Amino acid sequence: MDLSSVHVGVHKLKKKKRVGRGPGSGHGKTASRGSKGQWASAGAKKPTSLFEGGQMQLFRRMPKRGFSHATWDRHFLPVNVGDLDKAFNNGDKVTHQALKAAGLAKGAADGVRILGEGELTKKLEVEAHHFSKSAAEKITAKGGKVVVIPPPKRPKRNKMGSNKKTGKPNAAISPS
């Protein structure tokens, strides 16, 4: 190899397609667009890669099966009573923030669930969103306190509507 053949076959700049220059240009008459059709005129844009030329798309042809709870499922971080015994001192108040600081409730979640695995030797006041039956028994048996954090209230939906002036529900319309 010598310097005269280093750049052979390498085309850094691709020449622009010059249309409307006659049959001698190599793109004569229709400028490589074919005759008529959806893409022949100026301004037509090719759709996304999912476009299948007007036939029914694959994702619409596929059967829909199954069911997902993902829209309303809540994710709780499990914490065992034995872990609480190791991480906290006698008489401590255990909250979600305290569990995060202790490294027991890591990650994003909707709440904390206290489970009854392990032994508890200390008196603790524990605040959580859910307690297993055995965990609640172990905490109260040592003189501790179990505080259940209530879930957020569901929005109240008034399907009948109400009178905005009085605030009372609308009366049923009687045929007369």
Image (spheres, helix red, strand yellow):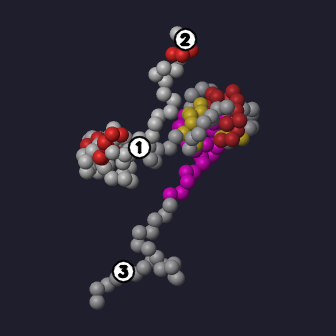
Quick one: label 3, few (<14), some, or many (20+) residues within 10 Å? few
Task: Identify the residue shown where x is 56% and y is 15%.
Answer: 3
Task: Identify the residue shown where x is 55% and y is 11%.
Answer: 2
Residue 92 seen in this snapshot: yes
Task: Identify the residue shown where x is 46% and y is 65%.
Answer: 157
Quick one: label 2, few (<14), some, or many (20+) residues within 10 Å? few
* Sequence order check, earlier mark of 2 and 3: 2
Considering the image in quadrants, where does the C terminus appear?
bottom left
Residue 143, position in %: x, y?
68, 38
Q: Are marks 2 and 3 in contact (CB under 8 Å)?
A: no
Q: Is residue 103 left or right of residue 153?
A: right
Q: What amino acid type should be assigned to the residue bearing mark 1?
A: Arg
Q: Marks 1 and 3: which is nearer the front?
A: 1
Q: Say which mark, if any, is on residue 2.
A: 2
Marks 1 and 2, how far apart in space? 35 Å
Q: Say which mark, if any, is on residue 172.
A: 3
Q: What amino acid type should be assigned to the residue bearing mark 2?
A: Asp
Residue 84, position in %: x, y?
66, 31
Residue nearer the viewer, 128 or 54: 54
Residue 46 seen in this snapshot: no
Q: Which residue is mark 1?
A: 18
Q: What amino acid type should be assigned to the residue bearing mark 3?
A: Ala
Say if the magenta span includes residue 61: no
Residue nearer the viewer, 10 or 63: 10
Task: Identify the residue shown where x is 52% and y is 82%.
Answer: 166
Q: Is residue 48 left or right of residue 99?
A: left
Secondary-structure class at tag 3: loop
Q: Which region is colored magenta?
A: 127-154
Residue 99, position in %: x, y?
67, 36
* Sequence order check, earlier mark of 1 and 3: 1
